[in-house]
Image (cartoon, rainbow, N blue to C red):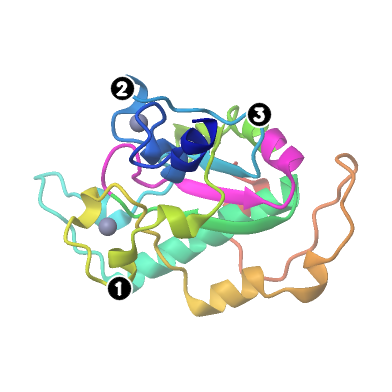
Amino acid sequence: MAEYLASIFGTEKDKVNCSFYFKIGACRHGDRCSRLHNKPTFSQTIVLLNLYRNPQNTAQTADGSHCHVSDVEVQEHYDNFFEEVFTELQEKYGEIEEMNVCDNLGDHLVGNVYVKFRREEDAERAVVELNNRWFNGQAVHAELSPVTDFRESCCRQYEMGECTRGGFCNFMHLRPISRDLRRQLYGRGPRRRSPPRSHTGHRPRERNRRRSPDHRHGRF
Ligand SMILES: [Zn+2]
Ligand SMILES: [Zn+2]
């Protein structure tokens, strides 16, 4: 029996634990879900809820009609957002293995940013500190997330360009970053093998990339 329960834990057959929360770290029923959301006490992954705002979804003129924001502008805006968050979190808290941003429209997934750190203690510290921060005029809401394998949580149809549920799909629609940025953020050999830093006395590295004044003061 125990073995059976273990085998169905977090799957759709599990009548006790919510499979959506288990796999995706968010469920459309939120706290009213009839199944359990087992919040982790330790995790490498944190989620910053509703942090990314896609300008195509939010840009509206005074009369309520949508402004036109081109796909190129959206990608550029997204890459800047991604780079800023990734760089700042990695410098403040520790090495990031993977970061993903949801482009879903449902309230429980829209703009969610999942950051998987290499070390659980970095994730823990990030959650505590980020919950006292503001980003783009809104309070940051961070929590430890049960998601460890993003292949389980993302929508395969979306990746093939075939998801018929669109933005309201309950699996993650992960917005890709541009190839150059991917190479820049994930492709650094020596950095990944650097020894763990002490939590104090860390001096921010000098960066040569283009930065707006906001970056220097760290909006986080
Ligand atoms: Zn649920
Ligand atoms: Zn989908």
Mark sitting on residue 34 = 2
Q: Was residue 114 drawn as part of the magenta stretch in this picture?
A: yes
Residue in the foreground of this view, choosing between 131 and 102? 102
Please state the horizontal and vertical placement of residue 105, each as a whole percent of the image.
26, 47
Closer to the chain start, of discs 2 and 1, is 2
Question: Do the residues bearing badges 2 and 1 touch, measured as CB atoms within 8 Å?
Answer: no
Closer to the chain start, of discs 3 and 2, is 2
Q: Nearer the viewer, mark 3 or mark 1?
A: 1
Question: Neighbour class for label 1 at 10 Å: few (<14), some, many (≥20)?
Answer: few
Q: Label 2's element?
A: loop
Report whether 52 appears left or right of 96.
Answer: left
Question: Do the residues bearing badges 3 and 1 touch, measured as CB atoms within 8 Å?
Answer: no
Q: Label 1's element?
A: loop
Mark 2 C-beta to ligand 1 under 8 Å? yes
Mark 1 sits on what residue? 160
Q: How many marks?
A: 3
Span colored in magenta: 105-125
Q: Identity of the amino acid at label 3?
A: Val
Please state the horizontal and vertical placement of residue 22, each as a whole percent of the image.
46, 39
Vertical placement of residue 31 versus 188, above or below:
above
Closer to the chain start, of discs 3 and 1, is 3
**Residue 59 visible in image:** no
Mark 3 sits on what residue? 128
Ligand 2 visible in quadrant: bottom left
**Residue 198 visible in image:** yes
Q: Identity of the amino acid at label 1?
A: Met
